[in-house]
Every structure is written in C-alpha cells, then in structure tokens.
C-alpha cells in the first residue's frame, strides 16, 4: 500500500505524539456553579493524556494598535513560551493561531501541515465562523464595556505609537504581521492556522479531546474566534482557559470603571460561569501563576492639613468611592493638625507611594517631611494637588522655627503662581479650556458645571502647563482652574476647586477620577520605552 506525502506526514505526527513523554497532565480545573441566586466556586482535579491534548495560542501578535496591549504581550510571551514548550515536550499538540497573519507563514512547514489533515466526519457546521455567545451566556450581562475597542493607552502615547508604527511600515490600525518571535514554533510538530475547519480537522486527525487556550484578548478573540473557547466548548471539546496566560482589551474609563487587570478577572469569572473552567500555568511548569508587573494596586498617599474646607472629611469619602481596590488603588490617608505644621507618618508613607494627593494650606513641615515630598517628585512620581495646595508649603514665616518651607512650590511644581482668591460666595461656571475637550481628564465630565466657591487667580500658566478647565465669573476675566504640568519626569494635576460643596458634584467627582487615571496611566519606564 502506498501513502501520500500528506498521509506519511500525519502518521509521523501521530507516532511522535504517542511516543512522547506520556505522563498525564494533572490539572485543577476551576469553575463556578449556580447555587440559588449566587455562584459558588468549584475546583475539580482531572488527568489529561498529552496525546489527547492540544494547546491553542491565540493572536499573540508582534504588534498591536494599542501600545499597552503590545507591551503586555511582550511581557507575558516568555512565560507563555516556557509553558508551551513544556507541553510540547510532553506530547501535547501545539497550534499557533495568529489571526490574519497566515500569508507571512505560507511557506512554513507548520503552516503547510495545517492543511494536510482530512476533513473530519464531525466537522461542526459553523466552525469557520466567529461565535459571539453560546447557550446560557447570551442572556447574561457582559461584565465589561468594550464598545470603545478596549484601548487603554494614554491619548498622547497612543498618537506617538501610531506614528512609530507608520515609520516602520505598519498599518497603525492593524499592524500585526506574525506571531511574536518569543514564542517558538517547532516546524516538525506544530501547526499554524487561524481557520476553524483546519484546526478542527487537525485535532480530530490526532484524536484530540482536550484543548487549552492561551493568548489575547480574553474578552474578544480568545472567546470568539473559530478556534476559541466558545466554539471548542459548544462542539464537545474538553476545553479550559489558562487564566494567567491571557489579557483583555479593556479600558478602565469604561463600565464598570475598574482597573485593567480587574477587568480581566471579571471576564475570567464570566468564562468560568458560562463557557469553560480555567487553570494556571504553574500547574504545568511550577513556580507561581504569572502576574503582570503592573498588576499591583497603585499606592496613593493622601496628605491633608488645611483648616477651612473640610477636606479631612471630603477627600477620604471621595477616595472610598472612586479610588477603590477594585479600581486598582490602595490609599493611605494622613491627616495633620494644620496648627502644628506636621503630617505624622508622611516620610515613611511616601517611601512606597506611587502617587501623592495633597490638600494642605500654609504649612512649614518638618525637614524630613518636606524632603520626602521633594524626593517623591524627584523620582518622577505623580502629584495630584487641590485648592489651597497652591500655597500649601509655605507658612510665610509663621511656621515652627527651623522648619523649612517651599515658597515657590506653586511656580516650580504646579506651573502657576498663586495670587489671591476671587471670593467665596461668587458663582463660577466651568468649561473646557481651548483644545481640551478631548483630553482624557475631561472624558465623561458633564460641562459646563457651576459652584459657589469662586476660584483662585493664577495666570499666567507656565509654558509646561496645559489648561484643562476655565472658570468664569460675572465681571471678571476667565481664569484657568484646572491644569496639568510636568515637573521633571513627574506628571502633575492641579485644580483650585475642592471646597466642600464641589465634592458632591458628579462633574467634579469624574474630574478627580479621570485625573488620577491620567497620572498613573503608564509607568515612566514604559513611557520612555522606544523613545516615548
């Protein structure tokens, strides 16, 4: 009997698979089960035969139109390669699925191999199509809003990233050409395909019953592609997501307004309820589950020492509402007695802080505390300052003897010199500054809005400052009331708003939430990567 080249290749693959390391994969599958009106977490242990198992690597592209997504793919790729290589060595069938990149691999043996399997007798009818929901799932409210496409780049960085992609000959809207090279392709064993029928036929020809999914993006491609979780689950494969080997396309500025990584957790919970169980990579390669470097709470220190605006009450209440753990913040609040010119614990707190929030007035702080603020800024860490902080670090000679002051803090750090207050009882209306309507700090802020606390005179702003909000009062010239600035490598946001009644305004609350997100949008080492 004579065999075709394709048949010989397929038989060789089956032989390799069956002769490889044959110890079963011991997995702890985590899922959720409905119990009345709630869901309970359930874990079950299973043994999967490597020869009956495949791993699909979804859309781990070399470049993405979202800068942050590209950075995260680069970060997770080494661990994913280690995970995939271990499984391959144990006899698991490896499928590389970089969608829309097949032309790059047209002459690759792994690409050719993908089309060599015969049509499976049980080829599902719609296996070549995207799947948006499976029975049961379609009635559930999707846990995150991805209607904006999920990009979480800062606008400035995103525009520079698009320019960079153009400069290297890539389409800024779809720059991917191949799978990131960190993930190795074994041309003698693996296949490359983004076609549901090819992948299904290849799995059936090898007797694959179990499928693991890794890659990006969990809420889109990993779930919906023709080779994704939904198609595998509804067509009878024993499928699981490797939950620490994935990432979402989710923008924290969209509902439910949680951190990017919390958004991924919410999608994983959804998958465990309605689609498939999950595992973690350490079950195969040991160590601990993978965690992105920046998947840690942003540590915010809120320092308050002012006698007149009750921010010792309003700021902690605001933090409890908008700077929450779910949104990726850990806050520490330090309240000092403004008459004592002291913020106890500030020096130690700032050693580990990521962002400083300042609401102080006419303070001459102890030398170590003022130095801690200087050190925080010198390290390139962000500052959010409100109201009286523009004249917060100088007591005009009335502080404790020997305590240093920073009289030019407003000019040097905030980017404008405080002059005077326009009046507590005057009604002011606030609108977007020229060119600032699309600034991320104003996203979702309902404008115009009003308050009755007047504003400060600080014009003109420094050349490094960017106006965000303009205040107008009858009979007075318009005045900037919120702006951003750069102090060295530190991002700075300041607003002279912050009186008690303003904390109750939805527009002010949204402004403060957006400002904090803008301050922490990217760590400095990512901002500076590749010239950014």
Image (cartoon, rainbow, N blue to C red):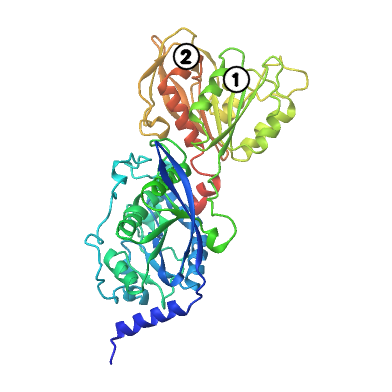
Q: Position of residue 247 (x, y in %)?
A: 44, 51
When the figure is inspected, residue 406 is found, relative to residue 208, above or below; the finding is: above
**Left or right: 119, with 292 as reference point:** left
Could you tell me which residue is drawn at 62 percent across and 13 percent down? Answer: 307
How many circles with numbers are drawn on the protein? 2
Front position in the image: 168 or 64:
64
Point out the frontmost of discs 2 and 1.
2
User: Element type at marker 1?
Assistant: helix
Which of the 4 quarters of the picture holds residue 266? Answer: top left
Residue 518 to residue 495: above or below: below
Residue visible at 58% across and 55% down? Answer: 288
Q: Residue at point 48% right, 15% down?
A: 455
What residue is pinned by disc 1?
Answer: 391
Q: Can you give x and y, in whole percent of width and height, for residue 418 in the image?
A: 55, 19
Residue occupied by mark 2: 501
Residue 271 place in picture, x, y as percent: 39, 49
Camera-nearest residue between 255 and 287:
287
Secondary structure state at the residue bearing disc 2: helix
**Residue visible at 43% across and 72% down?**
51
Q: Residue furthest top?
A: 425
Spot occupied by residue 217 in the image (x, y as percentages of width and height): 39, 52
Q: Residue furthest bottom?
A: 1
Above or below, comparing residue 428 to residue 65 in the picture: above
Q: Is residue 482 left or right of residue 313?
A: left
Given residues 7 and 239, the one toward you in this image is: 239
Q: 10 Å neighbourhood of mark 1: few (<14), some, or many (≥20)?
A: many
10 Å neighbourhood of mark 2: few (<14), some, or many (≥20)?
some
| Image disc number at residue 529 | none
Res. 134 visible in picture: yes
Q: Earlier in the sequence, mark 2 or mark 1?
A: 1
């Amino acid at each position: 009997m004579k065999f075709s080249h394709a048949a010989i290749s397929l038989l060789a693959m089956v032989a390799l698979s069956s002769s490889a390391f044959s110890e079963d994969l011991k997995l702890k599958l985590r899922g959720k089960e409905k119990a009345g009106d709630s869901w309970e977490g359930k874990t079950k242990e299973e043994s999967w035969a490597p020869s009956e198992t495949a791993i699909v690597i979804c859309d781990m592209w070399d470049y993405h139109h979202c800068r942050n997504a590209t950075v995260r793919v680069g970060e997770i790729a080494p661990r994913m390669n280690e995970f995939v290589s271990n499984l391959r060595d144990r006899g698991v069938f490896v499928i590389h699925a970089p969608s829309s990149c097949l032309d790059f691999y047209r002459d690759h043996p792994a690409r050719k191999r993908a089309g060599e399997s015969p049509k499976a007798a049980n080829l599902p009818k719609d296996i070549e199509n995207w799947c948006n929901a499976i029975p049961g799932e379609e009635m559930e409210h999707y846990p995150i809003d991805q209607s904006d496409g999920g990009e979480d780049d800062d606008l400035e960085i995103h525009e520079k990233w698009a320019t960079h992609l153009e400069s290297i000959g890539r389409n800024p809207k779809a720059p991917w050409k191949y799978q990131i090279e960190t993930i190795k392709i074994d041309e003698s064993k693996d296949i490359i395909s983004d076609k549901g029928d090819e992948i299904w036929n290849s799995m059936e020809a090898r007797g694959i019953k179990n499928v693991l999914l890794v890659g990006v993006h969990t809420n889109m491609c990993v779930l919906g592609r023709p080779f994704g979780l939904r198609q595998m689950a509804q067509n009878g494969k024993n499928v699981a997501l490797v939950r620490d080997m994935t990432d979402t396309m989710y923008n924290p500025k969209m509902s439910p307004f949680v951190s990017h990584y919390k958004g991924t957790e919410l999608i994983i919970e959804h998958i465990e309820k309605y689609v498939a169980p999950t595992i973690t990579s350490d079950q195969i390669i040991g160590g601990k589950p993978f965690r992105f470097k920046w998947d840690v709470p942003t540590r915010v220190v809120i320092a308050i020492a002012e006698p007149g605006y009750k921010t010792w009450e309003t700021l902690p209440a605001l933090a409890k509402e908008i700077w929450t753990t779910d949104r990726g913040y850990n806050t520490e609040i330090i309240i000092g007695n403004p008459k004592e010119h002291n913020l106890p614990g500030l020096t130690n707190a700032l050693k580990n802080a990521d962002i400083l929030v300042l609401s102080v007035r006419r303070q001459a702080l102890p030398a170590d505390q003022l130095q801690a603020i200087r050190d925080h800024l010198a390290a390139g860490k962000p500052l959010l300052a409100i109201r009286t902080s523009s004249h917060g670090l100088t007591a005009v000679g009335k502080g404790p003897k020997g305590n240093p002051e920073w009289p030019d803090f407003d000019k040097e750090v905030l980017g404008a010199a405080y002059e005077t207050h326009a009046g507590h009882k005057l009604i002011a209306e606030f609108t977007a500054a020229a060119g600032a309507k699309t600034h991320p700090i104003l996203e979702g802020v309902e404008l115009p809005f009003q308050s009755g606390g007047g504003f400060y005179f600080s014009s003109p702003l420094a050349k490094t400052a960017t106006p965000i909000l303009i205040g107008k009062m009858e009979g007075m010239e318009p005045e900037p009331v919120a702006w951003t600035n750069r102090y060295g490598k530190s991002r700075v946001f300041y607003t002279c708003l912050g009186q008690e009644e303003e904390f109750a305004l939805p527009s002010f609350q949204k402004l403060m939430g957006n400002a904090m997100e803008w301050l922490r949008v990217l760590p400095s080492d990512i901002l500076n990567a590749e010239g950014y």
